[in-house]
Image (spheres, rainbow, N blue to C red):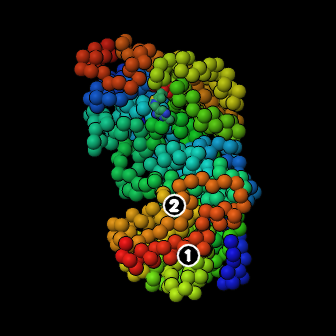
């Protein structure tokens, strides 16, 4: 079991995770830095304080489930899994390369020998679901949460969504059904960085008022500054106490957070930094 | 469609009628089944399961994409997840969800589609499912079964539920003649030899199996010895039976209630072309959409009948003789 880390430790880990992300994507020559960097504290708060998980037993039936619905932020998840001990940190630099376990978008992990029929893809322990085509994660997490209920287990399901991803109807199908079935061991997190692929959410497809939308769908809504680890942890703890309905945490974040020229810059949704940009980014992030 | 004397005694039933009772029976045995439904459970008969096991039945309303995702999540957490709706909405409406959330992780999700083919005749083209086999067969690792009658449907669903991995079972809305009795044993991945024959093989599935038997009886009068195979398992195809048919009968006609250019026949032709090329003919809907009408009228109009199969057999045999 991962022991709960202090806020200071988590913040320090978040810094390392940011550096991993920049290095990984730079080494791959492609990837999605913006939405990976915005999700760092959310993931770190979950993996180092909130989730019940154990890198030594990645398929432990009582583990909390984490589903990264915005699968293009895979580098952030891989980096956090590496910092947790699921894979060697050095392996991160194989992202997207032929033969690597680090697929461009998350691919579910199977123990050796399983899933040989349909794919030859390797993944890393700790990755719960296939993602990349957006907006499928919340439904999947509901299924896992319902299974916990059927099995009388007390694990919880967490799902991270992008705010552009919310344009998809399936998210709202899922939102409605989770409330209808009173799935209270489910927590959705919206990475509210206000940017999507083609630009600002407000210009592409306005989703405000977001809190009212979720509330009207029957959810308990929390709202936090998404780079504040303390606030995030408090919101996750508060969600655990909510009974009879699912919870969503709207985490206000900055796309590209931590790298000045990536912050709020639509260009870095899906482009890797070049050599110079990488050096600059790492310098800003306090890289060695 | 005419019912021949051999099978009339067994009566008729819609293959979808097998779903609810089979799931209940398997749950009674203790299988860890959970069912997800998208507001068609009374039509698919999944609702019968809801009545017996309400805590294991989840409706999502008219939301097929979400249904697939929840089924995938249930399966990932260890359940045998069953999702069902009409064939036209599954895989059509939620192909992306089936591909990413079910097929790629090869999860234990059983899709049972009812109202396959043009069985929902009068509702018209929006309700006809004539592309579903093509879509679902494009996904690596899926088991795909189209039972010919209710006896086979019950066994196909049971096989899917008891096996590991994703499955698609396609059923009918309308009642179809029951051709098997209780002694029948469905074997996944194996074609069932319905009738031996040396001149030509008709490979059929679903409702077309009965039509093929009727066609064979008709052709016998003309001195044509017709082998009939029920290719209920569309994926994986029984390659051995196909190659044997090509080798031993030298001509093949496929018959399916699906678009002819991209269904079972197209997949059979790939096996034949690669292994033992022989003349082939394809009975199915020919690159068009059908319209509103009674199911039997539509089958007639689009040639999905014993007569349509017999016609195709005669034409293929001509090519066989002339060596074309
Ligand atoms: C179904 C689907 N449509 C389109 C895309 C292409 N795409 C990848 S990321 C993205 C924008 C996502 O925006 P958001 O959810 O806000 O992610 P973030 O800004 O946090 O990176 C798009 C359109 C996709 N992956 N899936």
Position in image of residue B324 (x %, y %): 37, 72
- In the image, is B40 to the left or to the right of B109? right
Residue name at image x 34 percent, y 39 percent: A102
Position in image of residue B173 (x %, y %): 69, 61
Is disc 2's CB within 8 Å of ligand 1? no
Alpha-carbon distance for marks 1 and 2?
16 Å
Visible in this render: residue B292? Answer: yes
Position in image of residue A42 (x %, y %): 48, 25
Is disc 1's CB within 8 Å of ligand 1? no
Subunit of label 1: B
Q: Which residue is mark 1?
A: B310
Q: Which residue is mark 2?
A: B260
Local secondary structure at mark 1: helix
In the image shown, does A127 or B175 lie closer to the viewer?
Answer: B175
| B51 up-or-down from A3: above or below | below
Say which quarter of the image contains residue B114.
bottom right
- In the image, is B197 to the left or to the right of B285? left
């Amino acid at each position: 079991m991962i022991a709960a880390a202090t806020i200071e430790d988590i913040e320090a880990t978040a810094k390392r995770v940011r550096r991993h992300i920049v290095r990984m994507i730079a080494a791959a020559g492609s990837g999605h830095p913006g939405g990976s960097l915005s999700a760092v504290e959310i993931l770190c708060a979950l993996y180092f304080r909130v989730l019940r998980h154990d890198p030594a037993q990645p398929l432990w039936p009582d583990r909390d489930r984490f589903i990264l619905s915005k699968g293009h932020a895979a580098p952030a998840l891989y980096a956090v899994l590496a910092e947790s001990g699921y894979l060697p940190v050095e392996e991160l630099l194989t992202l997207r390369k032929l033969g690597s376990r680090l697929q461009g978008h998350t691919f579910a992990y199977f123990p050796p020998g399983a899933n040989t029929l349909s794919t030859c893809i390797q993944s890393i322990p700790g990755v719960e679901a296939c993602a990349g085509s957006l907006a499928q994660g919340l439904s999947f997490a509901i299924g896992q949460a319902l299974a916990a209920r059927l099995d009388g287990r007390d694990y919880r399901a967490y799902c991270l969504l992008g705010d552009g991803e919310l344009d998809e109807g399936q998210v709202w199908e899922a939102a409605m059904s989770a409330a209808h079935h009173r799935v209270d061991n489910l927590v959705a997190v919206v990475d509210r960085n206000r940017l999507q692929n083609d630009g600002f959410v407000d210009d592409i497809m306005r989703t405000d008022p977001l809190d009212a939308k979720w509330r009207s769908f029957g959810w308990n809504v929390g709202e936090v500054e998404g780079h504040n680890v303390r606030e995030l942890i408090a919101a996750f703890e508060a969600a655990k106490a909510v009974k009879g309905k699912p919870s969503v945490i709207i985490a206000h974040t900055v796309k590209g957070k931590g790298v000045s020229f990536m912050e709020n810059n639509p260009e870095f949704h899906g482009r890797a930094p070049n050599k110079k940009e990488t050096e600059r980014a790492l310098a800003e992030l306090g890289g060695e | 469609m005419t019912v021949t004397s051999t099978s009339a005694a067994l009566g008729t039933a819609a293959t979808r009628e097998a779903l609810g009772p089979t799931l209940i029976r398997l749950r009674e045995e203790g299988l860890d089944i959970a069912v997800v439904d998208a507001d068609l459970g009374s039509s698919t008969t999944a609702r019968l399961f809801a009545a017996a096991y309400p805590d294991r039945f989840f409706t999502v309303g008219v939301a097929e994409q979400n249904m697939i995702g929840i089924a995938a999540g249930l399966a990932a957490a260890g359940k045998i997840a069953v999702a069902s709706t009409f064939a036209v909405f599954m895989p059509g409406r939620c192909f992306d969800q089936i591909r990413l959330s079910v097929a790629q992780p090869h999860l234990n999700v059983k899709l049972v589609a009812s109202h396959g083919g043009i069985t929902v005749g009068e509702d018209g083209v929006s309700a006809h499912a004539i592309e579903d086999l093509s879509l679902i067969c494009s996904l690596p690792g899926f088991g795909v079964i189209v039972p010919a009658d209710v006896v086979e449907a019950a066994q196909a669903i049971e096989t899917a539920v008891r096996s590991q991995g994703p499955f698609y079972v396609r059923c009918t809305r309308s009642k179809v003649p029951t051709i098997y009795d209780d002694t029948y044993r469905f074997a996944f991945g194996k074609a069932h030899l319905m009738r031996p024959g040396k001149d030509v093989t008709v490979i059929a599935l679903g409702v077309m199996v009965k039509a093929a038997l009727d066609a064979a009886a008709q052709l016998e009068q003309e001195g044509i010895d017709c082998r009939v195979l029920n290719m209920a398992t569309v994926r994986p195809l029984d390659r051995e039976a196909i190659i044997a048919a090509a080798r031993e009968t030298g001509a093949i006609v496929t018959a399916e209630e699906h678009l002819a250019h991209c269904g079972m026949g197209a997949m059979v032709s790939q096996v034949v072309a690669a292994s033992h090329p022989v003349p082939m003919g394809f009975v199915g809907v020919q690159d068009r959409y059908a319209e509103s009408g009674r199911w039997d009228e539509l089958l007639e109009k689009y040639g999905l009948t014993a007569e349509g199969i017999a016609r195709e057999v005669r034409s293929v045999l001509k090519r066989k003789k002339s060596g074309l």
